[in-house]
Image: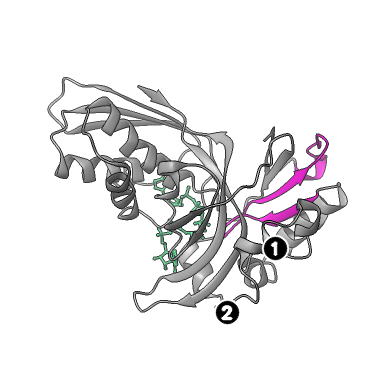
Amino acid sequence: MLRFPNAKINIGLNIVEKRSDGFHNIETIFYPIPLTDGLEIADSNKETIYNFSSSGIPIKIDDKDNIVCKAFDLLYRKCNIPSTNIHLHKNIPFGAGLGGGSSDAAFMIKMLNEKYKLELSFDEMKNLAGQLGSDCPFFIANKPVFAEGKGDIFSEIHIDLSGYYILLVKPNIHISTPEAYSRVAPSQPNKSLKELITEPIQNWKNLIFNDFENSIFPNHPKLGNIKNDLYNMGAVYASMSGSGSSLFGIFKDEPECPEIWSECFCWKSRL
Ligand SMILES: C[C@@](CO)(OP(=O)(O)O)[C@H](O)COP(=O)(O)OP(=O)(O)OC[C@H]1O[C@@H](n2ccc(N)nc2=O)[C@H](O)[C@@H]1O
Ligand SMILES: Nc1ncnc2c1ncn2[C@@H]1O[C@H](COP(=O)(O)OP(=O)(O)O)[C@@H](O)[C@H]1O
């Protein structure tokens, strides 16, 4: 079974308050984008519970620390799963605010449920995903939502960016999510993002912001410069995604990836 776990962008991100469990309540819009990894599972005749291999962008961690293996382990402990071969092809940059690892883990849960007919309900899969990371539950349904709480309480929204182009730029800067949260002073937004997102996209530039930008741009001016460049290139809306370090622009006409970003990961697609 072969599936393609996709990345997400955050359109707006308010860090509302620090919680007693150390996490933060946030408000954000999760929007899936068609930049994908490849994840394959197949029957194995080995004795180990899984055999993991990977290709594409190298992640220098032990196999057991890879979140797809953690997802497999979680289901193995709960359900009756036979030995499985797992192959992950990594294409989504990590430490990028694109949720690639979270998506791999959520897809692993959905794929095991389908392949081995585990009959886990949507809510059961969402709860299991929540044990692996705050961003994981989103990828179970994987459609645009307004998210609250840790990023795991969803309500439906109707935004449709189809027909627009996205240009994504990820410079060679790695930002750790826990560190990014530790540098932000939480505050209640004046107006909820759920209301602001109903404005036409042309108005988002002056209304919808990612709170991480205020603490990250001063330490990494290159990121703020890329956001300005995206607007100068004609983006209708531009922002950092999640805790960075990728930036995205939404364009009406197909953009080009300029030469100045030849050192960066640069990707574009029609939405
Ligand atoms: C910032 C966001 C925005 O979508 O995404 P990324 O930039 O990582 O993609 C998410 O909130 C990241 O979610 P995720 O990457 O799954 O984080 P987790 O593994 O659950 O948590 C890593 C650490 O981040 C902090 N954390 C995470 C989520 C949250 N709502 N509050 C937090 O304070 C905690 O310190 C936690 O120990
Ligand atoms: N399958 C995986 N893909 C990406 N990162 C992974 C994976 N498994 C574990 N990780 C670790 O999780 C961290 C965060 O990855 P990811 O969720 O893709 O990025 P981000 O938090 O920027 O959205 C990485 O720095 C990496 O060390």
The reply to whether residue 197 is in sight is: yes
Near-viewer residue (267 or 54): 267
Image-based side of 61 in relation to 208, left or right: left
Residue 190: image location, x then y, percent: 65, 77
In the image, the segment drawn in magenta is 236-261
Kind of residue indicated by mark 2? Ser
Residue 185: image location, x then y, percent: 56, 80
The residue drawn where x is 66% and y is 66% is 213
| Label annotation for residue 188 | none
**In the rendered image, which quarter is residue 259 located in?**
top right
- Whether the magenta-drawn stretch holds residue 50 is answered as no
**Which image quarter holds the N terminus?**
top left
Kind of residue indicated by mark 1? Ile
Image-based side of 133 in relation to 75, left or right: right
The residue drawn where x is 78% and y is 65% is 206
| Label annotation for residue 187 | 2
**Whether residue 71 is situated above or below residue 23 in the rendered picture:** above
- Whether the magenta-drawn stretch holds residue 249 is answered as yes
Disc with the residue nearer the chain's start (1 vs 2): 2
**Which image quarter holds the C terminus?**
top right
